Image (cartoon, grey):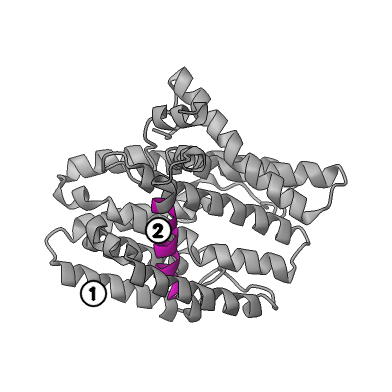
Amino acid sequence: MTALAREATSIPASAGLSKAAARDARIDIARGIGMVLVVWGHALYGVMNAGHDTQIHRFELLSIYTTHMALFFILAGLLAGSIRKRSWPEFWSMAFTRVIWPYLLWSVLLKTIHFAMSGYVNTPLKGYAVFDILWKPPSVMWFLYALLLGMILLKLTSAFSRPATVALAAALFAAGYLLPDLDPQMDWIRTSLRFIAIYLVAAMVGRAGFERLLAPAWVALATGVMGATLAYAWVDAADPIPGYAAFAPLYIPALLAGPVVAMRLAYAIGTARSGALGAALALVGRNTMPIFVTHILFTAGVRIVMLELGLTNASLIIALATIIGVIAPLVAAMLADRLRVAAYLGWR
C-alpha cells in the first residue's frame, strides 16, 4: 500500500456533508470528484471576474455547474436516512456539530477576510455587517445554509409518506424556476430550492434505490444526456452567463445525469486495482468540510499573487489555484487533526 493510500485510510471522517453511514471508499471518491469540481469552478469564476471571460472558460464553468452541487446534495440525501428517526434534541446536536457551527464560524471568518482584502478582490465589500450572515450566506457558504434547510425539512416531514415528501420536493423544485428574480444578495434562496428538493428526493430513494441507476443501460442513457447537455453548453457559452451558471431549464436533465455518471466513475475508480487515484480522491472526499470552507481563500490568494507578479496566463492561474485550493486545505486539515483542534474548526 502506498503512503498516500495509507494516509487516505487513516484520516477520520469529515463532519461535513454526511457522516451517517459506515465509510465506503467509493462514496468518498464521489465526494472527492465533487470537491475538485467545486474548487475548479471557483478558480474559474475568480479568473473570469478578473477579466478573462472567454467562451472556453464559460464552457468549463457551465460543464462543472451542471453536476457538482447536485452530486453533493444527492450524496448528502442518500446518507441522511437516520435524520427522520432522531429525536429533535439529537437532530439539533448533530446539525449544530456538522453544519451550523462550521457555517457560523467560517462565514464570519470569510466575511472578515473579504472585507480586509477589499482592495485586492474582484468584488470588494463596501461595509462590514457580520450579522447578515443569518440570512445572506457569504460566498460559498450558501451550500451549508441550504443543506441545513433541507435537513430541517427532512426532519419536519418525518410523518409524511414518501410520495408526499417527493411531492413537496417537486413543488420546491418548480418554485425555484417559477419565482421571480430576487435581490442579487438574496437570490441564493431561489437557486437553492432545486438542490433542497434533490436532497429530499435522494433521502426518499436511498442509496440502494439510487444505485439501480448505475446499471449499464441507465449509465449509457445518462452519458448521452450529458453529451447533449455539453453540446448545448458550448453554444450557450458564446454569450456571458447571467446569474447562476447552468440554471436554465435545459440543464435540468443533467442534475440527475451528471451525478449518475460521476457516481459510476467513482465506483469504477474505487474498484480499480491501481489505487493511487482512488486513494487521492478518497482523501479529498474524507476532508470535504475543511476544503470547502477554506478553498476560496487559497484560490483567490493564488490569483491575486500571480496577477500582482504580472503572471496573467489564465489557464496557468486556474490550474495552480485549483491544485493549491485542494492541497493547502488538506494540509491544514491534517495539521488540525494532529493538534486536535479540528472539531473546534468545525471540520470533524
Q: Quadrant of the N terminus?
A: top left
Q: Quadrant of the C terminus?
A: top left
Outermost residue on the top side: it is 339
Q: Position of residue 125 (x, y in %)?
A: 66, 51
**Looking at the image, is mark 2 or mark 1 nearer the viewer?**
2
Q: Secondary structure at mark 2?
A: helix
Amino acid type shown at disc 1: Ala
Q: Position of residue 103 (x, y in %)?
A: 44, 44
Amino acid type shown at disc 2: Arg
Residue under the point 55% across and 29% down: 332
Residue under the point 72% across and 42% down: 302
Task: Name the N-terminal-most of marks 2 and 1.
Answer: 1
- The residue indicated by pointer 2 is 264
- The residue indicated by pointer 1 is 167
Q: Dot 1, how many residues are within 10 Å of its Cα: few (below 14), some (14-19), or many (20+)?
A: some
Q: Dot 2, how many residues are within 10 Å of its Cα: few (below 14), some (14-19), or many (20+)?
A: many
For the question of whether residue 18 can be seen, the reply is: yes
Outermost residue on the front side: it is 273
The span shown in magenta is: 252-267
Pick the front one: 264 or 347: 264
Residue under the point 16% across and 67% down: 162
Q: Secondary structure at mark 1?
A: helix
Assign the magenta stretch its main secondary structure: helix
